[in-house]
Amino acid sequence: MKYGARNKITAKVTSIKSDQVMSLVKFDVSSPIQMASVITTESVEELILKIGDTVQLVAVSKGQPIEAVLLAFAAGQTAFGENYAQELHEKADALPEAEWHFIGALQTNKAKLVVGRAALIHTCDRVALAQELSKRAKSAGITQRVLLEVNVGREPQKAGVLPEDVPALLEKVRALPSLAPLGLMCIPPAEGDPRAHFRALRQLGQGLGLPELSMGMSADYEIAIEEGATLVRVGTAIFGERAG
Ligand SMILES: Cc1ncc(COP(=O)(O)O)c(C=O)c1O
């Protein structure tokens, strides 16, 4: 990810020592059993190294306690993704040094909880939502970065704009004063090979001059990177299964 906030945040993170973060954690992290039940810190470090500098790893912390986020943060993970507006709001307040991404379905009336707190909103998929995000960003005096979510598998139950409707939505989003559309995001169908969907998203983005591509989760982030992802959203491979 190439936008400016990343460097600023990384600089802040390096000034926080692991033991300072550990001291915030309310249980004995020296116990391997408790540690393993919250997060495998080793795997987040490995993933950061494996993914490298050109792709941003967004650790999906939805449903995870703040302690798990703090451990990942101490291990060097700076960006976290949340699916629920209220949860993002609370966790971003608890750890403002991290970079928070909103990756869930966003109701228009929850936009105010996310604007300004999320470095990037991955799920802008309709004009009414874009208008509300822009309105909130304008009154906060900021430009909100967004991605357009694309329903690449044309699944009726899924959020996202259909591929052929992306240009029209993008034109409207570009015309809004306080939104910066940087790229596209997708969640391909659970069944089948995601590669063709990732490739189609990259081609769509390229044709529209959109550099960022948020694609790939625990099961398929390697394929997504091969196909040009600039952000991957990885949850269970870092934190284990979510509660509930
Ligand atoms: C939009 C989105 N991206 C990524 C993830 C992470 O998925 P996984 O746990 O398979 O890595 C989730 C999980 O809920 C999600 O909703």
Image (cartoon, rainbow, N blue to C red):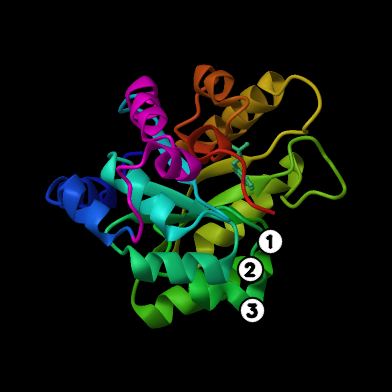
Instruction: Say whether marks 2 and 1 touch (CB < 8 Å).
Output: yes
Q: Looking at the image, which residue sits at the far left?
A: 15
Q: Going from the N terminus, do you reach mark 1 or mark 3 first?
A: 3
Residue 6 rendering spot, x and y as whole percentages: 27, 47
Q: Residue at x 79, y 35 (%)?
A: 153
User: Which residue is the site of mark 3?
Assistant: 109
User: Which residue is the site of mark 1?
Assistant: 126
Specify the segment rendered in magenta: 26-51
Q: Residue at x 74, y 19 (%)?
A: 193
**Label 2 element class:** helix
Relative to 8, say whether 46 is above or below: above
**Label 1 element class:** loop
Relative to 116, say whether 12 is above or below: above
User: Which residue is the site of mark 2?
Assistant: 129
What label does residue 236 carry, if any? none
**In-front residue for pair 17/218:** 17
